[in-house]
Image: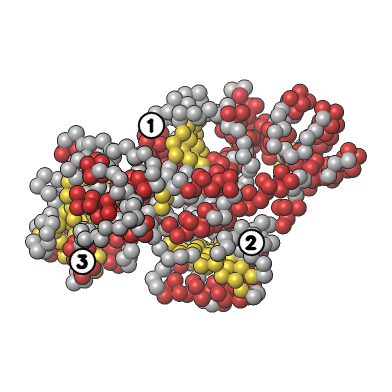
């Protein structure tokens, strides 16, 4: 028997205990086999105004609320404890929208008399017919046209389907809103893009189990139309999806990879990222999505892949560190009257872009480098760089950028294997050497390159021109504008730590969830801050939050060492974030870098001090004011990454001086 679930059902199910979830899944399974089974006590809720709601029995305390019309499938609409489940049914309606033909389940609204006032209603200048075209249920139209206060407006629309909320928020922001298409026939409504945001046809109970076992899986079932377009569209060249934290870019990257594996069977597909922690999590998530990973699918971070391929196709390698060539550059700096930090920065610039020939370095634009150079100065510097590269070569070593460029040269000569398609998650973290390698190891064909990125999470590399790298994405770029993960309160405070150049990227995003205000706490000492953090974690645990749902993030591992001891003394289970696919139980503890791509129900940022955000050691490396600005921007982005890992609760603690990035007032 065909069954569908709603997003609300899945969220309600996830909020119950694991024992209750198992009982509910057993009842759903039994219902699929025999809806009339006497143990389920299926009955229509006749006393309600909406006659389409039904109820089935799970145990003495739990009830599942279902919806059924004359021709459609049974829809699992909600589940909760007895009184709460029936209260939900009493306060919700299910009806087919008269304009677009899609079933909507929404909270009922009471029409109240409003005294005429001088204040202009938020969207009162629009017609009733237009609101109907936008998918607003008829019962909501008059209240919406009368509401004047923004808070009341937000409260009112919170009971509506998500797609309708998005349109109304755009309308209130004075943006043009195009009505959605209508359903061709009533039989097709479940296949309509609008319906697929809220309803999912279950193929098996295993899908429901997976959705409970992994938070990403919930997003995997309900894709927004913009996400679905990015996943399913055939692109005639490199493409990208852009969106701030919480908009579902990683979910798109995962679905896109699965789609490509199905679309091009028997070909090699690569899913990659800069961060090895994230690559490990992508592998675990894709295994959940596909059941098992096909042999033609490679999931590996780009540096891990490059090193492995170098050893397989070229030979053993000894990688040079900064210490191996810093002294040579320092000696040269004294002779050339340049700061050592500038010479190191300029060497890294040439090395990143693969400017190993004098003509390439001479002609390459240095726009934004901060310190101008004459042609003569360039020639002297390049002579020093050649000496460094030759000295490393004599020792049988090379920089990692050098490794990437040698692999690229080999790929461009056709002596390396190529992938049919490459998907890159968190692509903003890749520099020119990584992007040029990715470009070289993929076939020239439709759907060959797909990037998911957020400029606000750029914490490893500086900004660069994609066009200069031959990555033209005009007409093939999709922007995600709905934050599914983070409450509006957390999203607002996260936005405030971003550099001014990126604030607009986030302001365009809609956060539909509401929650408690984040806490920013000052303490006299580090020890007092530890105690404050432990008190907050205990408070969460006492209220039913699982240890694994709490993430504690620090700027440097040294702080994590002290915190780990504090947690163990307090008898609170704790485990370090790592690149393992499966972690042991306990509160998750790690650096902000190790939390890339993760989300937690509650996040604590420990040590939001001036000396850590920004990190003094990073600032000292900046040879010019321009470089310093770039370092500061990365450090601001890092704090934004930390804040945006949180779904419901955010706690920020510091001692001594606060980070200058923290919002005030």
Q: Is residue 62 left or right of residue 269?
A: left
Callout 1 touching callout 3 (CB < 8 Å): no
Callout 1 touching callout 2 (CB < 8 Å): no
Q: Is residue 140 left or right of residue 529?
A: left
The x, y position of residue 663, in whole percent, is 57, 60
The label shown at residue 659 is 2
Q: CA distance from mark 1 to mark 3?
A: 42 Å
Tell me the quarter of the picture where residue 352 sits: top right
Q: Residue at image x 62%, y 22%? A: 413
The x, y position of residue 506, in whole percent, is 49, 48
Q: Residue at image x 56%, y 41%? A: 428
Q: CA distance from mark 2 to mark 3?
A: 46 Å
Label 3 packing within 10 angstroms: few (<14), some (14-19), many (20+): few
Choose mark 1 or mark 2, whichever is in front.
Answer: 2
- Which residue bears the numbered disc 1? 233
Q: Is residue 469 left or right of residue 510?
A: right
The front one of 201 and 246 is 246
Residue extending furthest toward the front: 118
């Amino acid at each position: 028997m065909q069954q569908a679930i709603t997003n609300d059902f899945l969220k309600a199910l996830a909020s119950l205990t694991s024992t209750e979830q198992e009982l509910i899944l057993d009842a759903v399974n039994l219902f699929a086999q025999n809806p009339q089974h006497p143990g389920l006590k299926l009955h229509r809720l006749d006393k309600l105004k909406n006659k389409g709601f039904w109820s089935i029995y799970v145990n003495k305390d739990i009830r599942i609320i279902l919806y059924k019309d004359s021709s459609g499938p049974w829809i699992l609409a909600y589940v909760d404890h007895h009184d709460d489940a029936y209260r939900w049914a009493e306060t919700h309606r299910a009806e087919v929208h008269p304009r677009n033909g899609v079933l909507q389940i929404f909270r009922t609204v009471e029409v109240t008399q409003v005294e005429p006032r001088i204040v202009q209603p938020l969207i009162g200048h629009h017609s009733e017919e237009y609101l109907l075209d936008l998918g607003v249920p008829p019962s909501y139209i008059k209240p919406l046209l009368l509401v004047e206060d923004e808070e009341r407006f937000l409260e009112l629309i919170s009971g509506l389907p998500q797609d309708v909320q998005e349109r109304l928020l755009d309308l209130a922001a004075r943006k043009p809103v195009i009505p959605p298409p209508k359903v061709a026939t009533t039989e097709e409504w479940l296949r309509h893009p609008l319906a697929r945001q809220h309803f999912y046809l279950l193929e098996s109970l295993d899908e429901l189990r997976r959705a409970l076992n992994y938070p990403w899986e919930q997003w995997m079932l309900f894709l927004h139309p913009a996400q679905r377009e990015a996943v399913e569209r055939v692109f005639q060249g490199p493409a990208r999806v852009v969106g701030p934290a919480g908009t579902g870019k990683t979910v798109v990257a995962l679905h896109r990879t699965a789609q490509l594996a199905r679309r091009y069977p028997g070909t090699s597909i690569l899913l990659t990222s800069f961060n090895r922690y994230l690559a490990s999590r992508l592998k675990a998530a894709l295994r959940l999505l596909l059941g098992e990973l096909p042999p033609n699918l490679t999931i590996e971070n780009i540096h891990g892949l490059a090193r492995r391929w170098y050893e397989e196709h070229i030979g053993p390698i000894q990688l040079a560190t900064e210490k191996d060539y810093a002294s040579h550059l320092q000696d040269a700096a004294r002779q050339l009257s340049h700061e050592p930090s500038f010479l190191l920065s300029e060497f890294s610039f040439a090395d990143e872009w693969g400017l190993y020939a004098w003509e390439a370095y001479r002609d390459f634009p240095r726009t934004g480098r901060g310190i101008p150079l004459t042609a003569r100065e360039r020639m002297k510097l390049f002579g020093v760089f050649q000496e460094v590269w030759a000295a490393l070569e004599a020792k049988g070593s090379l920089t990692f950028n050098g490794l990437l460029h040698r692999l690229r040269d080999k790929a461009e000569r056709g002596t390396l294997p190529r992938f049919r398609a490459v998907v890159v998650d968190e692509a903003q973290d890749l520099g020119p050497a990584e992007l040029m390698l990715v470009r070289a190891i993929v076939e020239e064909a439709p759907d060959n390159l797909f990037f998911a990125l957020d400029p606000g999470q750029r914490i490893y590399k500086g900004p660069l021109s994609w066009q200069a790298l031959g990555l033209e994405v005009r007409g093939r770029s999709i922007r995600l504008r709905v934050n599914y993960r983070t409450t509006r309160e957390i999203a607002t405070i996260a936005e405030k730590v971003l550099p001014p150049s990126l604030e607009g990227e986030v302001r365009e995003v809609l956060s539909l969830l509401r929650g408690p205000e984040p806490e920013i706490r000052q303490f006299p000492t580090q020890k007092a801050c530890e105690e404050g953090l432990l008190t907050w974690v205990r408070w969460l645990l006492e209220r039913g939050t699982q240890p694994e749902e709490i993430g504690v993030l620090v700027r440097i591992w040294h702080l994590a060492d002290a915190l780990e001891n504090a947690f163990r003394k307090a008898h609170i289970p704790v485990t370090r974030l790592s690149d393992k696919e499966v972690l042991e139980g306990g509160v998750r503890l790690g650096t902000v870098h190790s939390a890339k791509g993760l989300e937690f129900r509650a996040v604590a940022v420990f040590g939001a001090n001036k000396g850590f955000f920004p990190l003094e050691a990073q600032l000292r490396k900046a040879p010019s004011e321009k470089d310093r600005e770039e370092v500061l921007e990365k450090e601001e982005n890092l704090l934004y990454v930390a804040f945006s890992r949180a779904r419901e609760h955010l706690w920020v603690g510091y001692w001594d001086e606060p980070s200058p990035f923290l919002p005030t007032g």
